[in-house]
Structure formats: structure tokens, C-alpha cells
Amino acid sequence: MTAQTHRFKRLFPFSILLVLILIHFGLSPESLNAQSHIAQMAPRVISSSSGPYSTLALEPISPPLPLVTHQASGSGTGLTIIPTFNANIDPATQAVINNAVTFYRNTFTTNITVNIEFHDMNTGFGQSTFFVFPVPYSTYCTALVASATSPDDRTAIVNTPCGSTNPINSNANIGVKSANGRALGIDTPDESFNFMNSPCPTFTGSGCIGLNVTAINQCCFLFPAVEHEIDEVLGLSSALNGTTTPAMPFTEDVFRWQSSGVRSYSANASTTNPCGVSTPAAFFSIDGGKTDLDDFNNCDNGLDYGDWITHTPSQVQDGLSNGTAAPSLNVHSPEVRALDVIGYDIEVPKHRRGQLTSQ
């Protein structure tokens, strides 16, 4: 059996913020059979999406999937995202997705290939499903240090201690998504999505993304919705879910802070908005909580803890958009900076707005 978590969440506006949580157990994909030279692990399948729908959680079981460090590889042209379109994705939507993919190719120099399936759906707004591997924190942090290239990377490393356990809750492991691990040279491979209730059962890759194209086009903007979900397949999001604080944080949780020197990693039962700017606060920071680069949605309001709060004007990773802008990512965006510090290499301009330098 393998662990599958469908977290239906957030993205764009006007939805009932009530989430039902269901627990279910299923069979492990045959692809989990492999050999290891370092450590064994079993990936979890996580699905995160918008709307008042259900969360399905499956706990990890054997057979384990091994972790083998290796040299990252790809097409030789930097980050290559290969979209696979379900037959229900119309040509206009395909064009929007391809335009978003172009941004990642032109911005990130990480030499890997990421396969993502896209399909239309008739509930919620957006949904991303991806594999999360329990990687030894020492392995992840060592790889992160070795790959540090940007000023933000160097600042983050100074404020992110390596060791046998993670600095968030002293767990020996950290949850690393398939694409994120491979960006660092860790063997977290593409997997088959042929599991119970899979949104893309015939697909093998790093993630699959569902878009309620009709609903998004009626109320919001499709391009930021696509970027939002791609960001999550690549590595953004928190392990926190509803009123649950999982024992294994995700990589972006390393940069989740409440105040200077005080980390934030605890589910908040409050449903009061805005979640994140009031107590308890949670914000994205790369310098140990000294500088708030963006505020996380930090409560049980049906949205993701890894999303931003609602901004005016809107931002790509906002959990609930108020429709005040049609945002798109650029090299200065906090979402891009977050992808940078969790393991992706980036073309950084000479004078990056808000750039922090290590001391």
C-alpha cells in the first residue's frame, strides 16, 4: 500500500471553506520496488486542490522505495516541463499552459525534466496531485548546501542548520516532492498515478493538475491558476492540513516562521480570516524569521497552509483570490524565491528587488 492524501483546497475565490476528511487505505504501486544504497522510503501521493471537497489520506507502507543520490539530469536546457494534455483540455487552455511552462523554462536553470498531466474537471477550481518522499533531512540539507548558487540560497543556508534531524520538529525525515528531490540530485523518481481515485490513472510523472476551466474563466484568471498548481508540483506547499500537524514537514516548511527566531509549524483550528497576519502568524522567510517575504494562510479555513493569504492586488499563490489583479510570476515573486531556496537554480538579475544577503 502507499500513502495518498487528496487535499482539496483553495486557489480562486468564492467557495465554501469546509473540508471533509476521509481516511482510506490502498495498494502500493508496483513501481515502489527498487534497490537502495543509502536509505529506504515509501512515497506518499498528495493531492492539493481548491473547493469544499474531501481529503483522502493513506499512511505509508511497504514495500519501501529507495533513495539513491545521483547527478541531476535532463534535456540540457535547464528546467524542462513536459505537459501531457487530457483530451478534455481545449486548445485555448493548452496555449495558456504552454505559456506558463515557457516561464519556468526561461527562469530556472535546473537541468531536469518534469512530466505533468493536465485535465479539466467540473468541481472546485484547481487541483495538483504529486508524490512526496520521506527523505533523511541530512541528505536533503547536504544537497541543498551543495546546490546553493543565488544570494537568497546563501542567506537561506546560513539560517538553515544541517544535522541528523530537521530544525522544524526534530524529525529525521522531511517530505520532498518528486521534482524537488531530483532538482537536488536525489533519486525521487516519476511514479505511476495508477492508484484508487486517481485523477490521472494512466499517467506516470511528477504530478497531475486538474483545472475547472469553465469556473476559473467565469470568475478569475486561468494563467495564475496554472502557475499556482505547477508551483505545488515543483515543491511549494505545507504538510499542515486542517487541524492536523503531521510529523513529517515538507521542504517549504523549513522557511515557515512566526517571528524572528521562532518557527511556525502547528495547525491552527481557527477559521477566522485573514489567517496568517493575526496570531498565530506564519510567514515565508529565508533569514530566520527576521524578514517577512509573504504571509501564509495559517488556519483551518479549507485552504492550504502553504498558500498565501488574500492580497490586494492578487498574487499567484493566494489561497483565495479577491480578483483584484491577473497576477503572473516573475523573478522577483516570492513564489519564485521560495522555489529557489528549496532547491531550484535560477537566473538571478544583478539587482534583485528585496534581495537579502547573508552576514
Image (cartoon, helix red, strand yellow):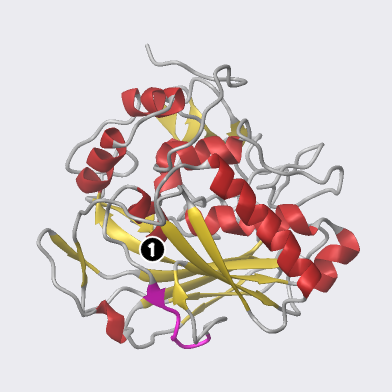
Query: Which SS does the magenta portion mostly show?
Result: loop
Tell me, yes or no, if residue 163 can be seen here: yes
Report if residue 196 lies within the magenta region: yes
Count the numbered circles shown: 1
Give the residue at the far front of this rendering: 76
Circle 1 packing at 10 Å, graded few (<14), some (14-19), many (20+), is many
Regarding mark 1 in the picture, which secondary structure is present there? strand
Q: Is residue 255 left or right of residue 116?
A: left
Q: Is residue 74 left or right of residue 22?
A: left
Tell me, yes or no, if residue 279 can be seen here: no
Residue 40 lies in quadrant: bottom left
Instruction: Point out residue 146 in the picture as x, y percentages from the top left corner.
Output: 26, 35
Residue 275 lies in quadrant: top right
Which amino acid, by three-letter code, is at mark 1?
A: Val
Q: Is residue 341 left or right of residue 322?
A: left
Determine whether 196 is above or below 174 in the image: below
Quadrant that contains the N terminus: bottom left
Residue 86 lies in quadrant: bottom right
Residue for point 19% across, 37% down: 163
Pick the residue in front: 54 or 351: 351
Residue for point 52% across, 52% down: 237
Residue underneath mark 1: 132
Report if residue 227 lies within the magenta region: no
The residue range painted magenta reads 191-197
Determine whether 233 is above or below 286 in the image: below
Instruction: Point out residue 121 in the picture as x, y percentages from the top left corner.
Output: 71, 78
Determine whether 326 is above or below 226 in the image: above
Q: Is residue 242 left or right of residue 186?
A: right
Residue for point 58% across, 21% down: 352
Residue for point 47% across, 88% down: 196
Quadrant that contains the C terminus: top left
Instruction: Point out residue 73 in the picture as x, y percentages from the top left corner.
Output: 33, 55
